[in-house]
Amino acid sequence: MNIDYSICNAITQAANSIDNSLIIYDVGCQWNLHFGEHVDNCPGLTLPDNTEIVAAVGKFHLSAHKLACFARYSLNFTLGAAQVDGEILETLWAPFNKKSPTAHSTSQAHCQEILDDHMHNSNWKKLVGIDEC
């Protein structure tokens, strides 16, 4: 239900002129089965009229799914997905995991500062390097 709430709020916030939403989720094939039913049955979940949601599974995670998921949920065959891999959050974890041992032996507040500093630094490097792409 948490992911349903997050998706509904994100689409509602950005719905000014967007009718189609591509939701890339590791278990999108399962989530998509009952999402419409959840929205219909829960008053806290609403979507703008004429909203079309296309579910997909990131390329890395799709290989662990059943073969039947491949054609339906592959980003390779999703109209408008271009050449995205759908795994942006996972690419952040590798460098983030290198910092976590440092944070383990600290207080909760200091641990939060270490991890926040790392993420701010990562975002800054991306921002500064935008023109290099």
Image (cartoon, helix red, strand yellow):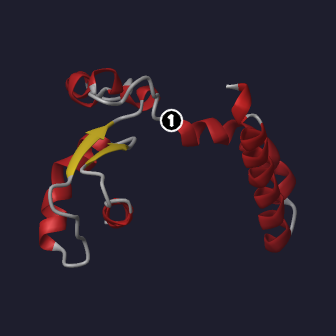
Where residue 17 sits, quadrant-wise, is bottom left
**Residue visible at 81% across and 73% down in the picture:** 109
Disc 1 designates what residue?
87
Where residue 108 sits, quadrant-wise, is bottom right
Q: Which secondary structure lies at badge 1?
A: loop
**Quarter in which the N terminus is drawn:** bottom left
Give the vertical position of 63 relative to 57 (above or below): above
Q: Which residue lies furthest to the bottom in this view?
A: 43
Task: Pick the residue in front: 97 or 115.
Answer: 115
Give the vertical position of 13 relative to 72 (above or below): below
Total numbered badges shown on the rendered structure: 1
Which amino acid does the dot numbered 1 rest on? Glu
79 on left or right of 109 = left
Residue 38 placement (x, y as % from top left): 18, 64
**Residue visible at 33% across and 21% down in the picture:** 76
**Residue visible at 81% across and 47% down in the picture:** 99
